[in-house]
Amino acid sequence: MTNSTQGLFVTFEGIDGAGKSTHIAGLADAFRSAGRTVTLTREPGGTPLAEKLRALVLNDPMDPLCEALLMFAARRHHLLEVIEPALARGEVVLCDRFTDATFAYQGYGRGFDLSVLGSLEQWVQHTGQDGQPLRQPDLTVWFDLPPEVAAQRLSQARSPDRFEALPTEFFARVAHGYGQRMAGDPQRFARISANQPVEAVWQEVQSVFRLRGWIA
């Protein structure tokens, strides 16, 4: 098992409808059973300020640059107020979406300049002293789901927000973006096939964490 005094930062990614939430809750229980303290959080959001920015991003029309700036502003506050303190206490931080989502949605989905997003990533995710590495997740779990399946799931769920209402072609670009992020940093990613029954997805998720010795 992992050192219980060492913080662990895990993020969960995937297009809308991929079914992350159920498995995040299950993993939180598994880590608690292993004696770990868990912080469950999400992006955009995670702090009162970031939740206000989340509401703007999800509901108010704006251009991709505004979206990206609000996302990274929320992320900076989230990192400083929630993620970094929890990691310093040796907790497990399970976060529903992080920077990969911004690249996938605003970069690949919206077609926004990836180099600008890269600069924002560098500025926002350096939260310590000069010379310290960029804060990135220890593991990113990508729930990979065909966009047409995601669209069918969303049509049977709640009323869509501004992003969920976008066409299947948009989510195809987003899914491609996640694939590109994984290709650029394969050691950080674990790809999960989300196009299978919930029980099978859960087994696959558990195996990822067990192989790393993080849960029993």
Image: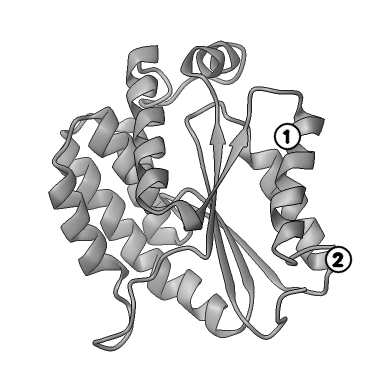
Residue 76 percent coordinates (x, y): 32, 66
Residue drawn at point x = 80 percent, y = 57 percent: 29
Q: Which mark is residue 36?
A: none
> As displayed, is residue 107 above or below residue 128?
above
Task: Measure the C-alpha gap from mark 1 to mark 2.
Answer: 20 Å
Q: Quadrant of residue 119?
A: bottom left
Q: Please tell me how crowded label 1 is: few (under 14), some (14-19), or many (20+) other residues with Cα within 10 Å.
A: some
**Residue type at numbered disc 1:** Val
The residue positioned 32% from the left and 44% from the top of the image is 102
Check disc 2 and give the amino acid type: Ser
- Residue at label 1? 201
Is residue 167 at least partly visible in the picture? Answer: no
Q: Determine which quarter of the picture holds residue 6.
A: bottom right
- Which residue appears at 40% of the width and 69% of the height? 79
Query: Which x, y percent locates residue 131?
Result: 26, 86
Q: Camera-side residue: 117 or 74?
A: 117
Residue at numbered disc 2: 33
Which of labels 1 and 2 is toward the front?
1
Q: Is residue 123 left or right of residue 99?
A: left
**Quadrant assignment for the N terminus:** bottom right
Residue 215 at x, y percent in the picture: 79, 63
- Residue drawn at x 44%, y 53% is 45
Please tell me whether residue 31 is drawn above or below residue 181 in the rendered image.
Answer: below
- Label 2: state its secondary structure: helix
